[in-house]
Image (spheres, rainbow, N blue to C red):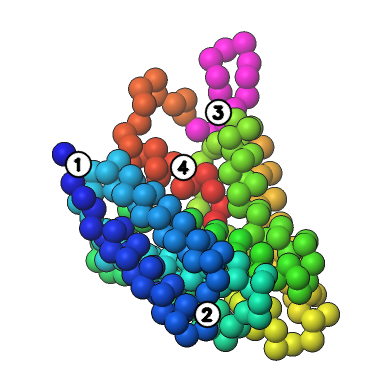
């Protein structure tokens, strides 16, 4: 019988408790409840499957920090859906988002200090980051226009492109600028959510943030195109990369390579 992974289950319980707290204080509609519970359940299932595939007993210290951040993101997602039917509790959403952004730097530090960095942890961190940007973009649509959704959808469009275009499945080299750009997106979007500056100025700042994101993704796409496999009359040549071995890599290696495919 498969072992029950307690970490993801506890995360789902805490997600429910946080949603109940919001419902009892600022209020939460049925749509908000449904969004928060669905997000928590998907996170629990995905984490449980990831832990089993990685052969890991349970979440590590850094993963617990990321899970805490993910729970806050679930609450922001619930309040975002709620905001389409009534006035949103902006102060609460800004606080939750700001704490989630701070924890984004904490989980990496904890992973390095405790020697518990893993492919699963990197992927989990990446998914939470991407979903937070998507949620913030959805919230800002009525304030700035539908174009802001491009920020939240960019990473998911990149994933779809990986599925469709084989040449985009190469492993990207590490680049610190990606992390800087990803951090800028979060800071700019939470600033825009606070709605404390004139909206024309806010739109300009968000547009500049989007331009940085397009540049970062575009640079990665260009790199992948230049390093794409070249078909000749001889066995496949893959630029500077050696040919893949015929056997499938271990699960952990597949997770590491998948995470390396993605820019943020």
User: Magenta residues?
Assistant: 229-241
Q: Quadrant of residue 161?
A: top right
- The residues tagged by marks 3 and 2 sit, at their Cα atoms, a distance apart of 55 Å
Judging by the rendered image, the residue that carries numbered circle 4 is 258
Q: Nearer the viewer, mark 3 or mark 4?
A: 4
In this rendered view, identify the residue nearer to me: 127 or 241: 127
Query: If you read the primary sequence from the N terminus, does the residue marked by circle 4 or circle 1 appear first?
Result: 1
Q: CB of mark 1 within 8 Å of CB of mark 3?
A: no
Q: Position of residue 87 (x, y in %)?
A: 66, 80
Q: Position of residue 195 (x, y in %)?
A: 70, 84
Circle 3 packing at 10 Å, graded few (<14), some (14-19), many (20+), is: some
Q: CB of mark 3 within 8 Å of CB of mark 2?
A: no
Query: If you read the primary sequence from the N terminus, does the residue marked by circle 3 or circle 4 appear first?
Result: 3
User: Does the magenta segment cover residue 66?
Assistant: no
Judging by the rendered image, the residue that carries numbered circle 1 is 2
Q: Nearer the viewer, mark 3 or mark 2?
A: 2
Secondary structure beneath disc 3?
loop
The circle drawn on residue 27 is 2
Q: Residue at x 43, y 65 (%)?
A: 70
Q: Nearer the viewer, mark 1 or mark 3?
A: 1
- The residues tagged by marks 1 and 2 sit, at their Cα atoms, a distance apart of 38 Å
- The residues tagged by marks 4 and 1 sit, at their Cα atoms, a distance apart of 25 Å
So how many labels did they put on this image?
4
């Amino acid at each position: 019988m498969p072992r029950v992974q307690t970490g993801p289950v506890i995360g789902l319980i805490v997600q429910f408790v946080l949603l109940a707290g919001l419902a009892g204080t600022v209020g939460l509609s049925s749509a908000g409840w449904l969004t928060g519970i669905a997000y928590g359940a998907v996170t629990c299932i995905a984490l449980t499957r990831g832990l089993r595939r990685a052969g890991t007993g349970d979440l590590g210290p850094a993963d617990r920090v990321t899970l805490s951040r993910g729970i806050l993101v679930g609450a922001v997602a619930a309040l975002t859906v709620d905001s389409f039917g009534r006035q949103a509790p902006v102060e609460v959403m800004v606080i939750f988002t700001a704490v989630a952004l701070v924890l984004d730097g904490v989980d990496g530090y904890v992973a390095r200090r405790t020697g518990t960095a893993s492919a699963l942890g990197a992927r989990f961190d990446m998914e939470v980051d991407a979903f937070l940007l998507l949620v913030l973009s959805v919230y800002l649509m009525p304030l700035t226009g539908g174009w802001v959704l491009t920020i939240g959808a960019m990473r998911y469009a990149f994933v779809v492109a990986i599925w469709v275009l084989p040449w985009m499945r190469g492993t990207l080299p590490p680049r610190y600028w990606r992390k800087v750009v990803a951090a800028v997106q979060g800071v700019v979007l939470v600033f825009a959510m606070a709605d404390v500056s004139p909206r024309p100025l806010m739109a300009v700042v968000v547009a500049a943030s989007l331009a940085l994101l397009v540049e970062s993704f575009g640079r990665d796409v260009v790199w992948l195109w230049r390093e794409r496999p070249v078909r000749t009359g001889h066995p496949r040549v893959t630029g500077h990369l050696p040919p893949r071995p015929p056997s499938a890599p271990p699960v952990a290696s597949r997770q590491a390579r998948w995470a390396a495919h993605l820019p943020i």
